């Protein structure tokens, strides 16, 4: 099974989109699965179900950090990391047509109306595809 397949399977088993990406790719960079699941827990639903940046994209950005960021102050490395992050966001937006959860879902999880819609069957049917997009982009960027 490919890593993108694993990420989608993780999402389909009940984890949020951010957890699905970070827990799938984190081990490749020494991040324990349980720790990855905890770190990414608050990023689902557009960060705390606020409808902001897609959790799959947030998780992918965290993976880029694991791969490309450095642990000391380094202006050049910081600039390179920001450039990679911008590229990932641009490519995600090109493939998914948006980056914010509320736009991708078609409703706002942070409102009472959005919370009601979230409880309807099929409300999150778009999410496995978004996890796949984020994972596929990571596959390209991590080569």
Image (cartoon, rainbow, N blue to C red):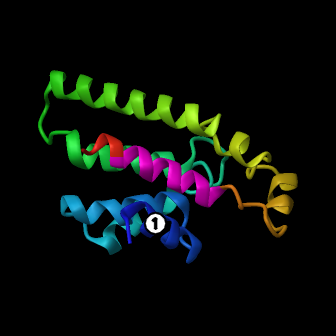
- Give the residue at the far front of this rendering: 1
**Is residue 132 within the magenta segment?**
yes
Q: Nearer the viewer, residue 15 or 142?
A: 142
Horizontal relation, residue 73 to residue 90: left or right: left
SS of the residue at dot 1? helix
**Is residue 47 within the magenta segment?**
no
> How many numbered marks have been drawn onto this rendered protein structure?
1
**Residue drawn at 57 percent across, 46 percent down:** 54
**Residue drawn at 32 percent across, 50 percent down:** 63
Quadrant of the frame with the N terminus: bottom left
Q: Nearer the viewer, residue 106 or 91?
A: 91
What range is drawn magenta here?
127-139
Horizontal relation, residue 78 to residue 55: left or right: left
Image position of 7 with respect to 113: above or below: below
Q: Which residue is mark 1?
A: 5
* Percent position of residue 88, x then y: 42, 35
* Percent position of residue 87, x then y: 40, 28
Rendering quarter of residue 73? top left
Quadrant of the frame with the C terminus: top left
Magenta segment main secondary structure: helix
* Percent position of residue 65, x then y: 28, 44
Horizontal relation, residue 58 to residue 105: left or right: left
**Residue drawn at 14 percent across, 42 percent down:** 71
Q: Residues within 10 Å of mark 1 (few under 14, many from 20)?
A: some
**Residue drawn at 80 percent across, 47 percent down:** 107
Horizontal relation, residue 136 to residue 54: left or right: left
* Percent position of residue 75, x then y: 17, 22
């Amino acid at each position: 099974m490919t890593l993108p397949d694993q990420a989608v399977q993780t999402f389909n088993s009940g984890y949020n989109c951010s957890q699905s990406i970070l827990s799938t790719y984190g081990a490749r960079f020494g991040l324990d699965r349980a720790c990855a699941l905890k770190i990414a827990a608050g990023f689902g639903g557009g960060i705390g179900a606020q409808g902001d940046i897609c959790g799959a994209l947030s998780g992918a950005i965290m993976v880029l950090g694991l791969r490309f960021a450095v642990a000391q102050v380094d202006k050049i490395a910081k600039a390179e990391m920001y450039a990679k992050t911008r590229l990932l966001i641009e490519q995600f937006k090109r493939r998914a047509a948006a980056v914010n959860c509320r736009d991708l879902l078609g409703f706002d999880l942070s409102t009472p109306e959005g919370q009601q819609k979230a409880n309807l069957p099929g409300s999150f049917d778009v999410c496995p595809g978004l996890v796949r997009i984020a994972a596929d982009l990571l596959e390209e960027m991590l080569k």
